[in-house]
Image (tube, rainbow, N blue to C red):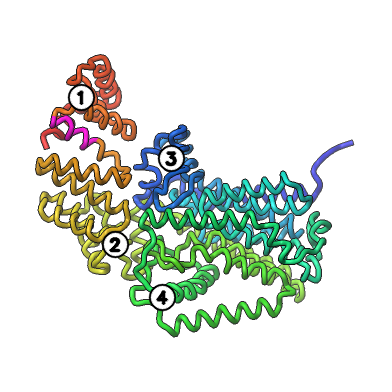
Amino acid sequence: MTIGLSSGSKRTLVLCLLLALGTLALYNRVFRAEFLRYDDDRYVVENPQVRAGIHWSTVTWAFTTFEQANWHPLTWLSHALDCQIFGLNPAEQHGMNLLLHAANVLLLFLLLQWLTGYTWRSLAVAALFAAHPMNVESVAWIAERKTVLCMFFFLLALLAYAYYVSKPSLKRYLALIVLFAMSLMSKPMSITLPFVLLLMDYWPLGRLRSNRQVDPEVSALSGSASAKRSMAWLITGKLPLFAMSAASAVITMKAQQAGGAIRMKYSLPTHLQNAVVGYVWYIGKALWPSRLAALYPYPQTGWQMRTVVLAALFLIVVTGMVLRYRQRHYLFWGWFWFLGTMVPMIGLIQVGNQAVANRYAYLPFVGLFAMAVWGVSDIASGLKIRSYVAAAAAVVVVAFCVVAYRQVGYWHDDFSLWAHTLAVTRRNFVAEDNFGNALIKAGKYDEGIAHFRRAAEIEPGDPVSEVNLGFYAQQHGWLKEAEMRYQYALQLASDPQVRAAAYASLAGVYYTLHDYPQAQQNFDSALRLKWTSPFIFLYMGLIAQKTDNWNDAIRYYATYIAVEPTAVGYFLLGQALEHAGDSARAKLAYQQARDTSGDISHARQAAEKLLAQ
């Protein structure tokens, strides 16, 4: 007797392999991409807790910090694990994002196939999810690990719920709770999961008593799912999940307030208008994903009332049609999946400068893809044109792949990302600032300052522009102008990271002016705001050394080399240890400097240059 896979299982396995290989091939360019100075620095490159790898202190910090205006401990730990295994290598960290995206593609396919019994329709939805250009941002941006990780646990939670429904037990319900908690601890966008589970009860599980029937080709769940329940009963069974969502919402609000991410720049009616137009904007990008950008600025004058009214009418008409044809359960399921899962990201409360964002579509677009695939398939079956529709679907997926592959290239580095963003958006002061920084990094100072000035012109109250203009002045030795710019940025900024950058830069000005008490005071202010750039510890060590405070110098230099192990750092630590009378450890530090640089004289010259400033 031979035991083997059934033909259906073999087909599923082959399709999973094709989906995985196709996704990896589509995104292979991410392995050549760099870290961006757009949150990658804050999340990984200049974050000492993350760079230290997995330790008990890292775990404690991850679960207690509101850094980056979020509470997402599993996201922090995933980045720390990357650093533990790969170090500061962007290729592997991009690769982890890609592997999570590929896993999400497979989980989505298997979930839909299991729940509905439709293999090819489920494959089409998964292929659209894998290839859609709007999802590039969540995959190709290392700092967006939180989105792909959250989706991973979200889909696992949906599978756990289906498993629980097939044979209810406490253990299976606890598995659902744990996976939901892990999703929330990756990114709070998953707070809508209880709502999604109610949609699953409606279709494809068919557990809601008002349903006339379960879909004709339902999976092995059809037997248990046929036991109808009232809406009140179904909601009651999810009360622990709703409580978890409420707790996550409260924690998220506190984190965003603590991080200065919530902006009160516009009125509530303006936010409502943006939300209405935003829904239609996302639908448009789902159909025609062109001119995609890293950031879409909030319209400074708001949306025209005609645009808002037309968008509202469109949403009302579509909702009415979905309710009118609710016997086609997938329309109701897909539409309300899209509307509901988008609520946390639609901008009713403004977080950041963006009006909309590509990454916000990662979860909600699943609903639109299901509506499109099931709807077109039903029409094709009625008209007996399945083969033509299948060919058209393949063309659409290939077209999305071409656009997505090109979009991945824009995320290669800061220069290409922000050059493209400026090309496809208007009056984008954030893009001007970031492109200016990319030019400065490339040594094109005069070109960079032009973009900083353009940003300040577009948004006169932008503290980031003032910090950048101060940095330019500081680099040219115009210290009084730099001081003035940094002081003005501190008056404007509410974001702790921007304030910390201004304090640290201002401390650099005072250090150059040999005003060490003022420099120390501003460095301390930056540290209190959890400024993560390692150079701050180097300069605090230099100040301590210049004032003969050797114990503090040792502490600061040791902290610096723990994050940035450079030859000059080891040499300065050796000097401090030698002056403190610890000759044995000083010799070890000098040896480390020699091993790092190959020639200790270079480290000595660099240290002398720093001390001479």
Res 182 seen here: yes
Residue annotated with mark 3: 61
Residue annotated with mark 1: 576
The total of numbered circles placed on residues is 4
384 to 440, vertically: above or below = below
Q: Is residue 200 left or right of residue 529?
A: right
- Circle 1 Cα neighbour tier, 10 Å, few/some/many (<14 / 14–19 / ≥20): many
Q: Is residue 546 a member of the stretch shown in magenta?
A: yes
Residue 44 position, x and y percent, is 40, 43
Residue 214 position, x and y percent, is 79, 65
Name which residue type carries label 2: Glu
Name which residue type carries label 3: Trp
Name which residue type carries label 4: Thr
Residue 414 position, x and y percent, is 34, 53
Q: Residue at x 80, y 64 (%)?
A: 228
Measured in 3D between alpha carbons, the distance from the residue under mark 2 to the one under mark 1, in whole angstroms, is 42 Å
Residue annotated with mark 4: 270
Q: Residue at x 31, y 70 (%)?
A: 427
Q: Secondary structure at mark 2?
A: helix
Residue annotated with mark 2: 432
Q: Residue at x 48, y 48 (%)?
A: 72
Quarter of the image for the N terminus: give it: top right
Q: Is residue 204 left or right of residue 25?
A: right
Of the image marks 4 and 3, the number of the one nearer the N terminus: 3
Give yes or no for contact between labels 2 and 3 (Cβ–Cβ under 8 Å).
Answer: no
Query: Of tags 2 and 1, which is closer to the observer?
Result: 1
Closer to the camera in the image, 487 or 233: 233
Q: Secondary structure at mark 4?
A: helix
Of the image marks 1 and 4, the number of the one nearer the N terminus: 4
Of the image marks 3 and 1, the number of the one nearer the N terminus: 3
Measured in 3D between alpha carbons, the distance from the residue under mark 4 to the one under mark 3, in whole angstroms, is 37 Å
